[in-house]
Image (spheres, rainbow, N blue to C red):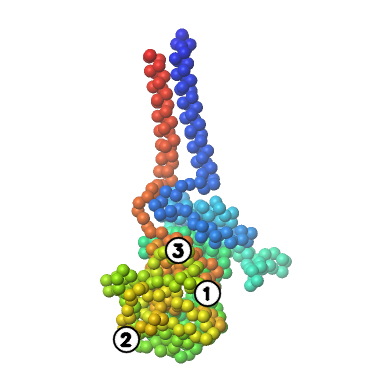
Amino acid sequence: MEWLKNKKFKYGAAAVALTVAVILLVILFNVIISALSDHFGWYADTSAGGYSTLSEESKALLDKVDGRYHSITICFLTDEDLLAANAYGGYVLSLAKQMEQQYDFISLDFISDVNKDILDIRNFFGMSYTALFQKMYEDHEFNSGTILLRDDTVEFGPDGAPLTDPQGQKIEAVRLETASIPDLYSSSGGSFLGELALTGRVMRLVSKAPVAAFVAGHGEMTTAEDEDYGNADYLAELMTYAGFSLKKTLMRDLASSGALCAVVFAPKTDFTEEETEELAAFVQGGGHLLYFADDTAPKQPLSHLNGLLASYGITVVNAKFQAGGSSSLSIDNYQFDARPVKDAAVIQAIHDQNRRFAVSDCRVLRLDSLSGMTAQALLLPADGTVLRGAETESRGNEAVAVTVKTAGGQVFATGAASLASSLVFSPTCANGDLLFSVLTDMGAPYAPLNIPTLPLLQDGLDITKTESTVLSVILSAVPALLVAGIGVMILWRRKRA
């Protein structure tokens, strides 16, 4: 076998051996990197809008959680691969995995079959099974789009210290939150709210939620269902993300509701004199008031309610703002970009002031400073606006939204209920961040300020876990096989030369 001793064969064999060694090293390198990526969460966000990346704003909130007292489980009621195969569900999963990888107090769980694993869900809910789980299960709220969040924590006293029993042991507690994955990207004007909702719910679990009471009885909400806030649904959702616990109440029950904030959203009928006095006493006692004027002409003058606002230096003018030129966003010019007051403290809490503050059908507010109160305009009408209505004389102190700090609590008023419409979740508008800033001033335990809401884009590289594995194999094997083929060809040609 003289050909084995041939110098050309030896060179060719060495080339093939080197090629095989390189191929093995490439494959080994990919295996190691894949394993480390799965363990440490190394990944590239291939979504068009960066949906899978946990923002610095979320990290700043989660960094505040004391992991000694909290253990949070985020449980998806679906198989992990099925969730990853859904584009936006996969983004929520990626965000949750980043939370798990970066924070020791957060872990993930999956229950692939709700009916088959019913006992697992009951165990997940623990002591709260009969009170919460059974009702939700009977209402068919558990499905593949449901997220359960559980926090095993300890109870804290008013001073922030953990409470203990007579034996000196910390009093343990279980807190629960639920979320619907489709609601994170389909119900809010075509925006992806995955990060905002997930971070918000985690923070709700670890914070003592103050109560915000939505005052009912004056046509404020279009429905009387307990969980439905009608026209104020978007505001209610926003306040939930800011950490408030919500309830509806009649004005006569506000004082006993334990509320920190009272929300009066687009009332259509006037308060009584007694109700107005109760609301004034609520603010004087340190409570906060959020007032959104109705964008339609009231059937009767809101004399008592407007009189209360006047006592804080806020006059509701019987007119609307009508914009013109480039500031107008609608054909009738009643929708426009409001201008932020740059030196207002609330506006300064918003990092990104380049986005618009959009409103429509805005009733005119006139703000006058009164003794003992600090009043600020937050949003002004766009340039070139005029007043349309019974009172058309401009005095130069008209505003879209104002805030007044009294000796007791704080009052926020806006002439545009649309400020708290679906625009709060629009990626192009800063309405939500404005309201988050206001809520922070009013005692929100945290507000996910500046956490991005993103448009639901259809472009970008959206691939499932299986497709990702196949793509990785192809990218690893094809170059290696190509190199091997070239080596064999070189060997064959040298042998024939």
Residue 316 placement, left or right of 124: left
Point out which mark residue 390 bears. 2
- The answer to whether the residue labelled 2 contacts the one labelled 1, judged by CB atoms less than 8 Å apart, is no
The amino acid beneath tag 1 is Met
Front residue (pair 370, 8) = 370
Point out which mark residue 442 bears. 1
Q: Where the C terminus falls, by quadrant? A: top left
State which mark lies toward you, 2 or 1.
Answer: 2
Q: Residues within 10 Å of mark 2 (few under 14, many from 20)?
A: few
Which callout, 2 or 1, points at the residue further toward the start of the chain? 2
Residue picked out by circle 3: 352
Front residue (pair 449, 373) = 373
Which residue is at a point 69% across and 64% down the rendered structure image?
169
Q: Position of residue 248 (x, y in %)?
A: 47, 77
- Measure how far apart labels 2 and 1 are at the Cα level: 34 Å
Front residue (pair 81, 395) = 395
Point out which mark residue 180 bears. none
Q: Residues within 10 Å of mark 3 (few under 14, many from 20)?
A: few
Q: Position of residue 53 (x, y in %)?
A: 47, 53
- Decide if residue 95 is in sight here: yes
The residue tagged with tag 1: helix, strand or loop?
Answer: loop
The residue tagged with tag 2: helix, strand or loop?
Answer: loop
- Measure how far apart labels 3 and 2 are at the Cα level: 37 Å
The quarter of the picture where residue 156 lies is: bottom right
* Above or below 39: residue 372: below
State which mark lies toward you, 3 or 1.
Answer: 3
- The answer to whether the residue labelled 3 contacts the one labelled 1, judged by CB atoms less than 8 Å apart, is no
Which callout, 3 or 1, points at the residue further toward the start of the chain? 3
Front residue (pair 215, 497) = 497
Which residue is at a point 39% across and 81% down the rendered structure image?
396
* Above or below 27: residue 308: below
The amino acid beneath tag 3 is Asp
